[in-house]
Amino acid sequence: MTKSNTQTKKQINGAEALIKCLENFGVEYIFGLSGGAAIPIFDALVGSKIKLILVRHEQGGTHMADGYARATGKPGVVLVTSGPGATNTVTGILTAQMDSIPMIVLCGQTITSMLGKDAFQEADISGITMPVVKHSYLIKETNTIPRVIKEAWHICQTGRPGPVLLDLPKDITSAPFTGDTLDPEMDIPGYKVPGKPNKNDINKMAKAFKGAKKPLLLIGHGAVIARAGVAIKKLAEKLNAPVTNTLLGKGAFPETHSLSMGMLGMHGTAYSNKALVNCDLICSIGSRWDDRINGNNAEFCVNAKKLHIEVDPAEINKIVKADAYVIGDAREVVEELLKLVEPLDTKEWLKELAFYRKEYPLKYSNDKGLTAQNVIDTCYKVTKGKAIVTTDVGQHQMWAAQFYLTDKTDYWLSSGGAGTMGYGFPAAIGAQFGKPNDLVVAIVGDGGFQMTLAELSTAFIHKLPVKILIIDNKYLGMVRQWQELFFDNRLSGVDLEGNPDFVKLAEAYGIKGFHIDKVANCERVMKEAMDYKGPCVIHAEVIKEDNVFPMVPAGKSAHHMIIEAPTTKLEKPTGST
Amino acid sequence: MTEIKKDPIHTISILVANKPGVLVRVALVFARRGYNIDSLVVSATVNPKFSRMTITAKGSPETLDQIIKNATKLVDVIHTSEHDPSHSIDRELALIKIKNTPAFKTAVVKHSKKYHAKIVDDTDKTLIIAQSGTTVELDEFEGILKKLGVLEYVRSGKLLMARGKEQT
């Protein structure tokens, strides 16, 4: 191995060893914000091949690393200081953990002799983050740094990916590194990565498909992470089976494909939810039967065989009892399954679904003025569906999922599990760093954007041509929708009237601003903005009160889907949120 | 709905890396899912790189399945298993402090053989008795002494080992 330390005569310290290891892994960017306890690490970045992207808030840094990871499939790296610098990453770590995103979070820490003594800017960040990381380390010996970072790099991206945090006391990063190698053996005997999928399990699953008349393939984020798209397309076409996807499964199977039913679940298409209710077999490929699609387990696909392809053994039988399951990487499993399954006769089934599609299409009307759906639909058409889209969380996210169809893996970046507002814009920055030649559009809400908008500086300074499409309805719209539908329209804590002038705000950061407020100027301005070379904000003022439909109330099964605005009062939902 | 029944007690053996913080990670898996840990014993194994945790906890079998899977998923956990009492040997240790009176002493001596109990400290005012045995034996002996009046009672929690060739 030439990689192992060709010990230059120069003595290096722990921080320099750390950065050299990251360089050897091929890390291109570190998203960071400096501070006292992390100075040795920032010092080691001077003259490094790795480009440091100085962010304006650590949360933004974590979402950038996350967006970079989702857009490229490579781990994102974050570097922050101790105390508040470290605690500001918690939301981003949760976001990455819930959506299985490979990420390394490097936190400066007070010197080891002061640990636990309430030192200045001390926070027990490895303790604070324990429930939301895949793994973490508090490093106490300088010479263990290369082994630990190698393990972290391996753990964060294998099996079910997730964030790994390194808590790095300043004396440890400052001390001389006297180890023999920067490429030592890993020592993680307890770490389990699923091996080749079990042949018997695959045979059993292939048999289960036999005779199915109404099959449905459910594609989740695991399929995206495993790059299973090609295999899934072959499987769907061989079986003649319709395909639906979760919010995070968007892109693993082209949503423009004739077999695609689009997204299912709480705000999925009516026809995908009809497919869910009426299928006689459902096969989840990398989805964990999340409560957004399951709603009520007692009524979930009661008459269907349930099959589960899953990389994480802890997901088997967690929510849905599987009739057959295979543990393994989604791509590997589907490729094996493909060899064993026979085409199914689904003519009647596809006819039935075509009827639902015709009867209950996604739609919107311009009667009351410019709608968010219209703006997003226009964005989809103007960009020809080719943009990498990131979103925040809420109504605009659901409308974006419905109207911005995704055809390619890694082109849809959204915080699904955690539902993190403020994710979209920084994630777009990270994605643009990773994919400099792609058009990146952040579709964000007026609420979410204001949580991380400080990163406008980052976009401006690095001349990143991200397009920030702000869907401004001057409300925290999804909560307002719930209050209207389930809480007698008693609005509480949702009014955002008094928002800044987003065009002027953009200009203050040196970023071009566009404004859309009418159906009549929507397409023209959208074109201008998308053609603009450089970062820009598109402030779309849409009608204030509009609701996302279809809607399956939380805690209910898809049988209870509301397709259009109800005329009678609804009972309060029993599901979590 | 089934009526409320007492959740069964489970004994779980976890082989972990012998490192700081591992106990917290394991405890979080239990706490998050509403399992109260009744007893916990941790000690290094023959190989000092690893420790063995023996945990007894109450809760539903379905939740336990999730707990075992999620504990196993932890990077520092090598192996997790639930043990069936018929295939394992288990013991607990108790230290009991009582008043030193002739009546107490007689009672202790009378039951000492059956309950594997021994007087390990004999002062003017107090006696300390050490007992090792199964959970049932400890419970019964505690019952007897409680009637006489116990000053202090400390119990180790369950230790367990799989029988025969099977690994704990």
Image: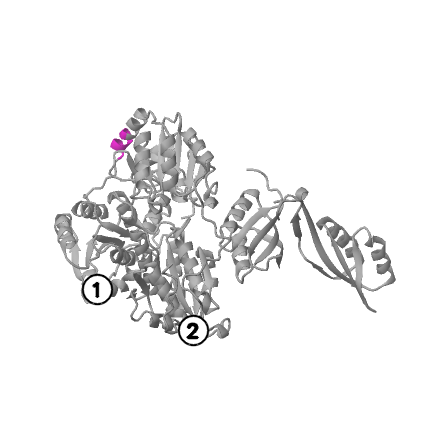
A558 above or below B79? Answer: above
**Seen in the image, is B107 located left or right of residue A414?**
right
- Amino acid tagged 2: Pro
Range of magenta residues: A354-360
Point out which mark residue A460 bears.
1
Instruction: Give the mark nearest the N terminus, 2 or 1.
Output: 2
Query: What's the chain of the residue with tag 1?
Result: A
Whether A186 is among the magenta residues is no
Whether A358 is among the magenta residues is yes
- Amino acid tagged 1: Phe
Q: Nearer the viewer, mark 2 or mark 1?
A: 2
Counting from the top left corner in percent of width and height, residue A187 is at 48, 57
Badge 1 element: helix
Query: What's the chain of the residue with tag 2?
Result: A
Residue placed under numbered mark 2 in the picture: A176
Query: Which one is in front, A123 or A275?
Result: A123
Residue A286 in view of the camera: no
Q: Are marks 2 and 1 on the same chain?
A: yes
